[in-house]
Image (spheres, coloured by chain):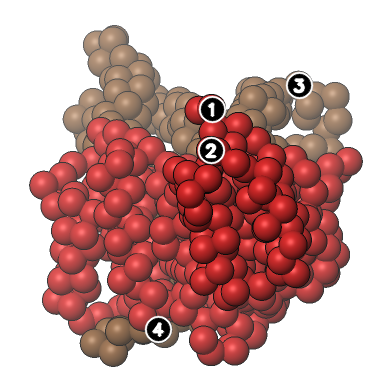
């Protein structure tokens, strides 16, 4: 390059070319704007206000197991909607606005572009939708019941909640690489999110495929993974964790494949 | 001029479903040239640029930039290119300075001081220093365009690709862009598309005209401006014009006279086959007591004439 002897050139090579720049940009979007605290406020507001209503509306707090299930319903279901809303614009929005074409006119590979979105948004979701509201929830339950949840079980349950969100994150990202408008992306993912219970009712085999039973018990029985981990029960199938993780990776793989063929 | 080609395309074609956006384009762009890429809307200019950057894939044919294949080595090509899109869109949550930092980080990892200095230079170049730390979402179209010009140059590109660089700029902004392009010629090759023919005429040394995906004219700007009709003189005169006409047509180097009228005078377009003889003899033949010459000059084409002729009337053999 003409006149750039004073500079050290970037050393990333292969598919990682541009990953550092894109990660910097994506982390800026999360952490150097008001996005992080707005998301924290929203999810603390929704999850912990609902939990407070459960914990403090009666003189005697409900049984610990019931509180755990309700907390994981709130923490496992509602933020998934937020994940879909955030992620639906990540690829489609950039394709439509022209910023993807602009960024990819720089020495940034397509895998680096897409993976930076996955990493930065996953960490953003983990911090603002899982960790912060859960810390507040933990404190609330200690105040209300004087009985703290078992910490390893609590952390394991949060990991499973995050896996459930990651499933919808990777699915939304993948669909964003196929469609050029947000409607179908949001429609398909939210449809799946809210139809899981019916789909499993019609096709019971789907209980081993869809992420619903990671966080939500299907019937009266406490058999969802995260609540079991939180209360120390072994009445769950760990295979679902593996299946959902593999599905999420598959979505990312398909998304990378499709994005490498995208024309801007 | 060096014979090294920075850009070469061979039968480069692009089709979208039923639309043939680019048809068998053969292009050669010399190093350190300012290459004007002209054509009406939908001619295939932006498609060609996107093919060079690897943003889209060719349907047929191939292209190379710096000798590298645009499909297989597009990231390596982009590491040496600066690009201004036709409608620049940046991340709205960033400021102008953050945008330039982001772009610089795609090329350089340090030293930080030198990068910041380069960013300040670029902001100064496009007169955005005072707005460097404002979010881009508050920028006007012209300011975005200027930021686009700055980010395209931040990496000292060996090839600067500008898609309509003067769009959205006021006349002063346009003048500045042309000045920058002229200055950069020493270090880099500039490939730019535009509708503003006056700008092309001012700074380009080579011009290509595309129409409906087909290359219809290509060559050094002087050649295109010389026209395809050969050398023509414009002569306005009054008096005994018929006698003057006979004297003219008797000369072997006068190939024809096209008649016309201008403010009551005879207006001739005299085509000549020997420009050197015509330059010294033509006026002498006309001047005598019975004829008054009110205007005498060699016909100059401007790019707009050439462009209109080519687009409306075929290539006139300039391909």
Report whether residue B298 is seen: no
To which residue does mark 4 refer? A1
Q: Residues within 10 Å of mark 4 (few under 14, many from 20)?
A: some
To which residue does mark 1 refer? B264
Residue at 30 percent across and 61 percent down: it is B179
Q: Determine which quarter of the picture holds residue B82.
A: bottom left
Marked residue chain, label 3 = A
Q: Which mark is residue B170?
A: none
Query: Residue A79 location in percent, x, y?
Result: 46, 32
- Report the chain shown in red: B
Residue at mark 3 to residue at mark 4: CA–CA distance: 60 Å
Query: Residue A107 location in percent, x, y?
Result: 49, 70
Question: N-terminal of the two: label 3 or label 4?
Answer: 4
Residue at 52 percent across and 60 percent down: it is B283
Single out the residue that lies furthest toward the left: B130
Query: Residue B212 location in percent, x, y?
Result: 77, 45
Marked residue chain, label 4 = A
Question: N-terminal of the two: label 2 or label 1?
Answer: 2
Report whether residue B175 is seen: yes
Whether tag 2 and tag 3 are in contact, CB under 8 A, the answer is: no
Single out the residue that lies furthest toward the top: A58
Residue at mark 2 to residue at mark 3: CA–CA distance: 96 Å
To which residue does mark 3 refer? A198
To which residue does mark 2 refer? B238
């Amino acid at each position: 390059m003409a006149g750039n002897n004073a500079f050290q050139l970037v050393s990333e090579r292969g598919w990682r070319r541009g990953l550092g720049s894109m990660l910097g940009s994506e982390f800026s979007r999360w952490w150097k704007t008001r996005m992080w605290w707005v998301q924290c406020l929203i999810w603390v507001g929704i999850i912990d206000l609902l939990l407070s209503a459960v914990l403090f509306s009666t003189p005697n707090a409900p049984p610990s197991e019931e509180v755990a299930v309700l907390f994981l319903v709130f923490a496992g279901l509602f933020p998934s909607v937020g994940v879909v809303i955030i992620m639906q614009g990540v690829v489609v929005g950039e394709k439509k606005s022209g910023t993807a074409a602009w960024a990819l006119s720089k020495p940034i590979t397509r895998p680096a572009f897409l993976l930076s979105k996955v990493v930065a948004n996953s960490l953003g979701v983990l911090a603002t939708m899982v960790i912060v509201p859960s810390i507040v929830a933990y404190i609330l339950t200690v105040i209300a019941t004087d009985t703290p949840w078992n910490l390893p079980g609590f952390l394991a349950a949060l990991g499973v909640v995050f896996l459930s969100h990651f499933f919808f994150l990777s699915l939304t990202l993948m669909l964003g690489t196929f469609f050029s408008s947000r409607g179908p992306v949001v429609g398909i993912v939210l449809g799946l999110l809210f139809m899981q219970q019916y789909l499993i009712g019609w096709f019971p085999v789907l209980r081993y495929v869809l992420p619903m039973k990671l966080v939500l018990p299907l019937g009266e029985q406490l058999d969802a993974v995260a609540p079991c981990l939180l209360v120390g029960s072994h009445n769950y199938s760990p295979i679902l964790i593996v299946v959902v993780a593999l599905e999420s990776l598959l979505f990312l793989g398909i998304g990378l494949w499709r994005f490498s063929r995208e024309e801007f | 001029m060096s014979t090294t080609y920075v850009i070469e395309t061979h039968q480069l074609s692009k089709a979208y479903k039923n639309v043939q956006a680019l048809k068998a384009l053969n292009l050669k762009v010399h190093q350190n040239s300012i290459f004007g890429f002209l054509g009406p809307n939908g001619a295939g200019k932006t498609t060609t640029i996107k093919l060079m950057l690897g943003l889209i894939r060719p349907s047929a044919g191939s292209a190379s930039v710096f000798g590298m294949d645009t499909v297989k080595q597009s990231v390596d090509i982009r590491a040496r290119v600066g690009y201004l899109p036709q409608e620049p869109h940046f991340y709205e949550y960033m400021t102008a300075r953050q945008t330039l930092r982001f772009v610089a980080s795609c090329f350089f990892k340090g030293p930080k001081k030198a990068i910041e200095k380069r960013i300040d230079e670029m902001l100064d170049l496009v007169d955005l220093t005072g707005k460097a730390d404002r979010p881009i979402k508050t920028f006007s179209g012209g300011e975005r365009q200027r930021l686009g010009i700055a980010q395209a140059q931040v990496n000292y590109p060996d090839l600067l690709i500008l898609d309509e660089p003067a769009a959205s700029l006021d006349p002063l902004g346009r003048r500045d862009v042309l000045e920058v392009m002229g200055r950069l010629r020493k270090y880099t090759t500039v490939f730019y598309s535009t509708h503003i023919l006056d700008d092309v005429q001012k700074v380009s040394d080579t011009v290509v005209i595309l129409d409906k995906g087909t290359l219809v004219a290509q060559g050094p700007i002087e050649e295109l401006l010389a026209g395809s009709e050969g050398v023509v003189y414009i002569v306005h005169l009054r008096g005994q014009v018929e006698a003057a006409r006979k004297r003219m047509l008797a000369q072997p180097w006068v190939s024809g006279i096209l008649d016309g009228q201008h403010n009551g005078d005879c207006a001739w377009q005299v085509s000549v086959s020997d420009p050197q003889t015509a330059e010294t003899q033509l006026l002498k033949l006309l001047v005598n007591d019975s004829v008054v010459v009110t205007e005498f000059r060699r016909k100059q084409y401007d790019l707009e004439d050439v462009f209109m002729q080519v687009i409306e009337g075929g290539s006139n053999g300039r391909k």
